[in-house]
Structure formats: structure tokens, C-alpha cells
Amino acid sequence: MIWLYIAGIVIFVLGLMASIGLHEIGHLVPAKLFGVRVTQYMVGFGSTMWSRRRGETEYGIKWIPFGGYIRMIGMLPPRPGDDPTKLRRASTGPFQGLIDTARDVAQEEVGPGDEDRVFYRKKWWQKVIIMFGGPLMNFVLAFVLFTILLVGIGLPGLSPVVSPDTNACVIPHGQTRTVCAAGDQPTPAAKAGMKAGDRIVAFNGVKVANWEEATQKIRKNGPGPVTVGIIRDGRPMTLNVTLIGREAIDDPTAKTKGEGFLGVQATRIYEQQSFGTVIGYMATLTGHVAESLVNLPQRMVGVWHAAFSGEERDPNGPIGVVGAGRIGGEIAASGLPVKDKLFELVNLLAGFNLAIGMFNLIPLLPLDGGHIAGGLWEGLKRAYARVMRRPEPGYVDIAKVLPLTYALAMVMIVMAGLLVYADLVNPIKLSG
């Protein structure tokens, strides 16, 4: 249904905007706590949809929900040796002129009495906390969402309980139908009288704890007579069953030839996990995300080929906001049960927050990680000066790397544009 598809996209976009808003709050709160004057708090880019001024800060929402920012005064220090009462000699170098212009723009917002409220004059550890606050909020939100997912909803699994969707007949290999037809032979389970809701608890007298154990024992046994212990309506029972070979339903040349086949389908369940599982789950995903970030340039080449050469899109490759929104729409419009849809949507948002947080920690400007690296470098220089009894060094001047920052910003814009285009012409789909 188209309205469900649209609803899924809207839900994802709202969740994304909430994540962006919380990311920026992670910067805003410590900035105000440490006395930095913040003039703007915005969710989104482009033209302003809505805004309201509270005190010295304008809070608002913009039309393009692909990011956000807070504007802190004095992000860049003035040029060393500048005398504000005298004219400064113009710089002729293109890079130096770019840097000087950025310094001038940064100083324009600094008014009388703001000298101690500029970002660059704060202690190094305060700068680190302010810039780390954004990614930290993403990690906290990811943890909360994964906790809801694993502890509240549970991980999807299979229970050794006969599902109501179990076919009562053997459908031969190569046929896609799911309904029994005249002439189809009944499954061994149907012949033995197994019913939906029966829980398999033993096989040939050996206890079975879960569906995986039951499957392994059935297949390993091969065709022939066996006993299957079940519980039906709270009463234990033992059924005599004659298994058939899996070649009756699989490709006769497959590796499954000679394996046993019972003919039951497991019941899909959600198993609630502990808080410790959440930490382990996030640690594993963090490793996967870190590996993906390291291989990002190589993976973007694959996105390029998928976008312009028609190659198949890597389902585990990079995906943009547009592609993630489309997946959200597919989830909502799918035929999955409501609980399954909720699980997938929460998982999508949680994974996106984890990825956003880690991406922002890359130690390159204009990302948060670049500012964090600058703050740490300043702290290291000051600590070294104290140990060596040298004069305290000045502030780390990130303006000197602005040309590189602009170049990286352009690369990021191109990458984002490529992902948007690929997500439109050759999107990653749930259905494959």
C-alpha cells in the first residue's frame, strides 16, 4: 500500500530529525555550560521553516533534514599579532586570503564583553567535551534503541513449535506453489499426526532444547523410522514417524541428498535479551561500522559503478539518507507482522545513529573528530610545555588547515550527492 510506504518514509525522517536534534543538543548543552555564546541551534539545512529566539540563541528547523548545526562565536582565533586598531596588510596568496576571510567572519560575531565567551579561548578539555557531546548523544540514542530492540522486543528466532503455516504435503523440487495439490504425498509429520502448536522436545529419546538441535538431529538421522517426543496442550506424547530423504524436496544433486526430512515449519518468536547482550551486540556492530569506514573509499567506487554502469548494488555497502528512507518505506509497506516491522524500523534508526556517531569521530575537519583532535593536540602541547618548564603555548589554530577542510567538505558533498543519486536510480532493496 502506497500510504504505508509513505508512512514508513515519514517515520524514518522524523526519527532522523530527532537524532540530528539530539546530536546538536549534545554540543549545545556543554557549550552553554562552559560559557560559549551560541547564536543558533538548527535542525536541517537550507531555508528556515520555523524559528524562535530564546535569550541569545535562535532555535529553528530548516527544510532539508540532512543535518544540523549550532553556531558558536569565535570558532577561529584572530591572526597572531593583529592589532584591531590598525589596518592589516592584505594577503596575496589564495589560501592565506581564504584563511583571513574566515577569521574575519568568525570575529564579526564577537561583540563587546564576548572576549571570554569565544570557543577558541576555552580550555582544551572543554573544547573536547563540547565537540564530543554530539557523537556521544548518537551513541546514547543507539544504546537506548538497541535496548528497546533486544531487551524490550527481543531478537527474532525460531522455536521448536510446529507453525500453523506448515504444509501438510511434500511439494516437489522446482515448484514455487505453497498450496497442496491432488496427488501430493503427505509429509512424514502429517502422516504421524503432528499438529500446529506441538512442541518438539525429544528425538529418538534424546532431549531437544531448540529448533537448531531438532533440525540437526532430523537431517543427520537420514530417512527411516524414528520417534519424536512432543508436548501437546501440556501433555507429553511420543509419535512414531518415518522420515523421508530431503532429495524429495531439494535438488537431487544438492549436498542435502540422504538427509532426513520431517516436514514441519518452526514458529517465529522473539527472545528477550539481557542488558549485557546489548553491549556485546553494539560492540560487534561497532567493529563492522569501523571496518566499513576504513574501506569507505573503495566501497564508494562500487556505488559509482552501480549508479552509472548498472552493476548490482552491494546490499552491505554505503547507503544515504534517501536510501534508508526508502528502506523504511519498504518495511512499513511489507507483509510482515506489525512486531516485525517495528523491530526492523527501530533497528534501522539505531544502526543509523551508531554510524553517524562513528563517522563524526573521524579526526578530520569539518567533522567533530577534527575539532576533538585539535583540542587533544592543544592539551598535549600544554602538558609538554609544563613538563619542560617552557612558556605556555597558544591556542591550536585550526584556521591553518581550512583549505584542507574545504577540500574534504567538497569530497563529502560529492559523496553525499553520489549516494542520493544511487539511492534513486539503483537503490538497495529489502527484497533483493
Image (cartoon, helix red, strand yellow):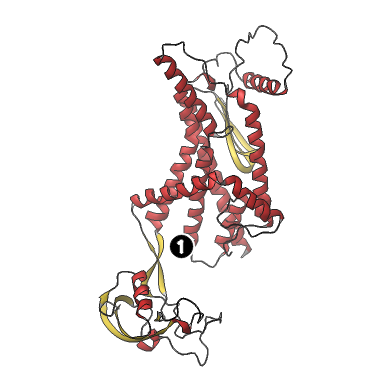
Examine the rendering and report whether any part of residue 7 can be seen.
no
Count of all numbered marks drawn on residues in the image: 1
Q: Alpha-carbon neighbours of circle 1 within 10 Å: few (<14), some, or many (≥20)?
A: few
Instruction: Kindly identify the residue that appears in the image at 49 percent across and 27 percent down.
Output: 31
In this view, 313 is above or below 78: below
Residue 233, compared with residue 1, is above or below; it is: below
Residue 186 percent across, percent down from the top left = 44, 88
- Left or right, residue 431 beside residue 272: right
Residue lying farthest to the bottom in this orientation: 183
Q: Which residue is at 60% across, 45% downward?
A: 297
Please name the amino acid that badge 1 sits on: Lys
Q: Nearer the viewer, residue 396 or 84?
A: 396
Q: Is residue 203 above or below residue 305?
A: below
**Residue 426, percent across and down?**
66, 57
Q: Quick check: 205 left or right of 250? A: left
- Image quarter where the C terminus lies is bottom right
The local secondary structure at tag 1 comes to helix
In the image, taking residue 268 as reference, residue 63 lies left or right, namely right
Give the labeled residue for mark 1. 339
Question: In which quadrant is the N terminus drawn?
Answer: bottom right
